[in-house]
Amino acid sequence: MNKKTRVNLQLNIFLQTCIVFGSAIILTIVIVLIPLYTITEPTTITVPTLSPKTFFLAFALLTALVVIISKRFTSDRFWKFFFDIGVFGGLYTTLFSLCVFFLPPVITTLLALVVPVVLLVARSRTQRIWLHNMVILLAVVGISQVLAQQFAPKQALIIIIVLGIYDIIAVYYSHHMVTIAKILFQRHSFFGVIIPLRLREWRQQYTHTTPGEDVSVIGAGDIAFPIFFALSHLYRYGFFAFWVMVGFIFLGMISMHLIYALPKNRKPLPALAPLGTMLIVGYAVVHYVIA
């Protein structure tokens, strides 16, 4: 591959990364910000109720469970069920949060139950990259919203720092995150966004792709946790703090891509590390410069 081709592919991947994060932010605005703006200032809506210890305990148990079952269960059907259950929860939360402000409770609940099932069935049958990515992004917004309602920005900062360190260890040292990601991808149950070499390839089936060769991947957590951090600021400090954090999410995304695009760095990247670094800087700006 010549230098010009490599640069073009990196620009294509960067463009798609911008689309992914931009779409996640737009969905957050539509599903969270607009309904809140039509009702009241978000600082009056929610109070954090959980401590980081609770989150880390749940995260550790879930990670251990996935590591154990990844070695014992190899059935595609099992992993598809595992994927569907996890994503269904995020989709339900997203759709319920959107519809509850505009529709009667019964219709809201019905839509929040039925639409996720339709989307998951369509994803499984068509196996198109664009539909898989849409399902993941919709679920990510719902999960991020639930987390943001439970943790204040200071608590969220602790979570981001610890997970950033964990990400580095899990990718570069223990390698278990890379192993799990490969297993989930092979079982067509990857919890993340798939980015092919070119934008037009979103119409392809993800079953015909291989991470590191013809596609790159971004874990759902690498999108969910930055949005969770921004929404935590929204609920506690209002819209301006949210937009500041969104700016630093995109700076983190740029940092992530620059590290990924380095010619010598073709191995898996712990994306939450550069993203988290920018979020820490954003936290400092919001709390010590602007405040």
Image (spheres, helix red, strand yellow):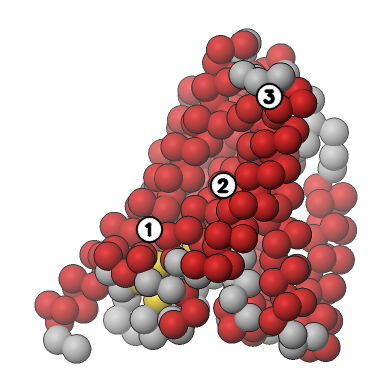
Q: Is mark 2 on a helix, strand or loop?
A: helix
In the image, residue 28 sits, relative to residue 178, either above or below, namely: above
Q: Give the CA distance from mark 1 to mark 3.
A: 31 Å
Foreground: 137 or 200?
Answer: 200
Front of the two marks 3 and 2: 3
Front of the two marks 1 and 2: 2
Question: Is residue 146 in view from this perspective?
Answer: yes
Quadrant in the picture for residue 208: bottom left
Category of crowding for the residue at label 1, using alpha-carbon neighbours closer than 10 angstroms: few (below 14), some (14–19), many (at least 20): many
Q: Residue at 55% of width from left, 60% of height from top?
A: 122
Front of the two marks 1 and 3: 3
In the image, residue 225 sits, relative to residue 196, either above or below, namely: above
Q: Where is residue 74 in the image (x, y as percent from the top left)?
A: 74, 88
Q: Where is residue 273 in the image (x, y as percent from the top left)?
A: 54, 62
Q: Give the CA distance from mark 3 to mark 2.
A: 16 Å
Category of crowding for the residue at label 2, using alpha-carbon neighbours closer than 10 angstroms: few (below 14), some (14–19), many (at least 20): many
- Is tag 1's residue or tag 2's residue first in the polypeptide sequence? 1
- Is tag 3's residue or tag 2's residue first in the polypeptide sequence? 3
In this rendering, position of residue 263 left or right of residue 271:
left
Quadrant (top left, top right, bottom left, bottom right) of the N terminus: bottom left
Q: Where is residue 277 in the image (x, y as percent from the top left)?
A: 52, 54
Q: Where is residue 214 in the image (x, y as percent from the top left)?
A: 36, 81
In this rendering, position of residue 17 left or right of residue 75:
left
For disc 3, the marked residue is 100
In the image, residue 185 sits, relative to residue 198, either above or below, namely: below
Category of crowding for the residue at label 3, using alpha-carbon neighbours closer than 10 angstroms: few (below 14), some (14–19), many (at least 20): some
Q: Give the CA distance from mark 1 to mark 2.
A: 16 Å
Disc marking residue 17: 1
Q: As shown in the figure, which amino acid type bears the numbered disc 2?
A: Leu
- Is tag 1's residue or tag 3's residue first in the polypeptide sequence? 1
